[in-house]
Amino acid sequence: MSTTVPRNEPLPRPSRPHVNWWLTALMAVLSLTVLVPLYFTVVTALKSPDQLDGSGFGLPEDIRWSNFSDAWNLTNFPSAVMNSALITVGAVVLTLLTNSLVAYAIARNMHRRFFKGLYYYFVSALFVPFPIIMLPVVKQTSLLGLDNQAGLILLYVVYGLAFNIFLYVGFLRSVPKELEEAARTDGAGTWTIFRRVVFPLLMPMNATVGILTCLWAWNDFLLPLVILSDPGAQTLPLAQYIFQSQFNTNYTVAFASYLMALAPVLLVYVFAQRWVISGVMRGSIK
């Protein structure tokens, strides 16, 4: 005997997702740590020096767009941006190619004493402050003729090796070895396995390492200061040092320059976020 459902009976409403209001409020408060300094930077960049005597958070009475043109000319912005971009791109590409390869060799041979000791040797470099080895590094790079952009790129790759090895090895331990064994059964060699099997699986970690390396190389001040000997090769942070003197600092033009330096990084994120997110999603699916 069949039963019929009354037509006038309302359909069940879909359940609404539970909202954690405490966590939402915490995230809103934490977002102020980014929004407040950004607002302060924008407001200061649009003011004249005499308007800085009042409240730093007040809106500018008369917008001064000439601060950006002054910053452009004083820092030789196009040349400095090109130098920073060249160093940053070179450091990111070499870091992803070399660090992931070294981490793969260590992760798949951790049962051997040599590779296990090599892993702890690299990780121990995290506890060595750079000022301790700064003078020997400056002397050595000068003797080898690496006090230039190429030498600076190599230093970023080498100094990022310790932390990147720590990240890569931890991620590679979660990658099943059966995928590599299946490829090896099909006749693939070690290089082919790494290029076609392992490296695509490292996309989430490659995105993380690439972003961290990009921000470090783009914003770094100390390494370019002590390594680069050619004034024409100075990066953007070095060029922005012109706004600071012993007795005075041109805050308005300096903050305008900081906003201009922020723009390329934002553009890279806007255009690259699709590949970063897709890499994370592909890594989670695989």
Image (cartoon, rainbow, N blue to C red):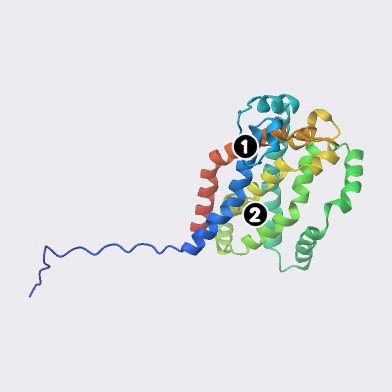
Left or right of 38, for residue 81: right
Q: Quadrant of residue 155?
A: top right
Kind of residue at disc 1: Val
Q: Which residue occupies the foreground of this view, 47 or 39?
A: 47
Kind of residue at disc 2: Thr
Q: Which residue occupies the foreground of this view, 96 or 42?
A: 42
Which disc is residue 190 wearing?
A: 2
Residue 35 location (% of width, % of height): 58, 46
Q: Which residue occupies the foreground of this view, 273 or 38?
A: 38
Residue receiving disc 1 = 43
Residue 104 location (% of width, % of height): 67, 57
Q: Which residue occupies the foreground of this view, 232 or 207?
A: 232
Task: Please tell me whether mark 1 or mark 2 is closer to you in this view.
Answer: 1
Q: Does residue 121 appear anywhere in the picture? A: yes
Q: CA distance from mark 1 to mark 2?
A: 55 Å
Residue 180 location (% of width, % of height): 58, 59
Circle 2: element type: helix
Specify the farthest residue to the front: 54
Left or right of 97, for residue 269: left
Q: Residues within 10 Å of mark 1 (few under 14, many from 20)?
A: some
**Could you tell me which residue is drawn at 35 percent across and 62 percent down?**
16
